[in-house]
Amino acid sequence: MTPTTIAAGVLLAGGVFFTFVAAVGLLRLPDIYTRAHGASKSDTLGAGLALAAVAVAFGGGLSSLKAGLLLVFMFITNPTAAHAIARAAADQGIDPWTADDHEGGDGE
């Protein structure tokens, strides 16, 4: 195994981990605001690490440049989309979840 392969593998493993954390956040967090926050932050980092792994695996060249441009695009659009979703929810009058909303029942 070359150092490049090891670096790409570590970056990819980090990307998979943070993408998994984003998926768990979508399932476990209580409302749209916390879900949008948790998913957008973790998903952006996961996708960024995966694209960095692609750039490292392909080495220098046009493919790495394209992966870098995709990385910049993801860093701009993911947080913007999460903000737009949260703003739309607020405009629709959806209240954020609070600790008072939890009745101590079945965990929902």
Image: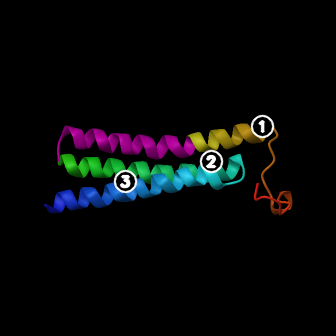
Task: Determine which of the numbered discs, if any, sits on residue 59 in the image.
Answer: none
For disc 3, the neighbor class at 10 Å (few under 14, some 14 to 19, many from 20) is many
Residue 102, by quadrant, is bottom right
- Determine the residue located farthest toward the front in the rendered image: 106
For disc 1, the neighbor class at 10 Å (few under 14, some 14 to 19, many from 20) is few
Q: Is residue 34 above or below residue 6?
A: above
Residue labelled with disc 1 = 91
Kindly report the secondary structure that dominates the magenta region of the rendered protein: helix
Q: Earlier in the sequence, mark 1 or mark 2?
A: 2
Q: Nearer the viewer, mark 1 or mark 3?
A: 3
Residue 65 counted in the magenta span: yes
**Which amino acid, mark 2?**
Ala
Report x, y in % for residue 38. 59, 54
**Which amino acid, mark 3?**
Leu
SS type, badge 3: helix
Tell me which segment is drawn in magenta.
60-80
Q: Decide: marks 3, 2 in contact (CB < 8 A)?
A: no
**Which amino acid, mark 1?**
Asp
Residue labelled with disc 3 = 49
For disc 2, the neighbor class at 10 Å (few under 14, some 14 to 19, many from 20) is many
Instruction: Name the residue at 33% across, 47% down.
Output: 51
Instruction: Name the residue at 55% across, 46% down.
Output: 79
Residue 89 counted in the magenta span: no
Residue labelled with disc 2 = 36
Q: CA distance from mark 1 to mark 3?
A: 33 Å
